[in-house]
Amino acid sequence: MTNSVRLEVPGCVTEPVIASGCCAVMAEDLGKEELMAVPGVHQVAVDQDRGLLTVSTLSNDSARTEACAIGAARA
């Protein structure tokens, strides 16, 4: 069984490319990478056109992800 959290990220629509130290990075790729690094996150789906990230966690995962951990990664 999985639990899902949907995050509205309008910056994916208004600013789809982020400048980094060496090159440009797609906002959706950066968001997905950061959220997948949170312990307990199973999957991240990106809907760039609507500015939505859906984060799925496994409910039986021993490192269950708290909404606050997802929020911290988002900040």
Image (cartoon, rainbow, N blue to C red):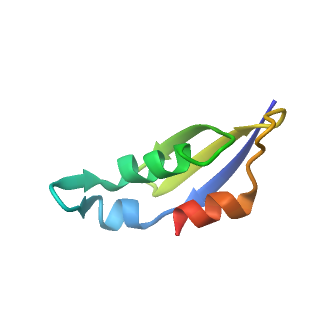
Quadrant in the rendering for residue 62: top right
Residue 4's place in the image compared with 17, above or below, is above
Is 45 situated left or right of 58 in this image? Answer: left
Quadrant in the rendering for residue 19: bottom left
Residue 53's place in the image compared with 15, above or below, is above
At a point 23% along the width and 61% down the height, the residue shown is: 20
Tell which residue pokes out farthest to the left in this image.
22
Report the front residue among 63 and 9: 63
Residue 30's place in the image compared with 44, above or below, is below
Quadrant in the rendering for residue 24: bottom left
Q: Is residue 17 visible?
A: yes
At a point 46% along the width and 58% down the height, the residue shown is: 51
Is 23 situated left or right of 14 in this image? Answer: left
Q: Is residue 49 visible?
A: no
The picture places residue 29, in percent across and down from the top left corner, at: 37, 46
Tell which residue pokes out farthest to the top in this image.
1
User: How many numbered marks are there?
Assistant: 0
The picture places residue 60, in percent across and down from the top left corner, at: 84, 32
At a point 76% along the width and 55% down the height, the residue shown is: 66
Is 2 situated left or right of 44 in this image? Answer: right
The picture places residue 41, in percent across and down from the top left corner, at: 64, 41
The picture places residue 53, in percent across and down from the top left corner, at: 53, 51
Query: Which image quadrant: the N terminus?
Result: top right
Is 56 situated left or right of 18 in this image? Answer: right
Report the front residue among 22 and 12: 22
Report the front residue among 59 and 11: 59
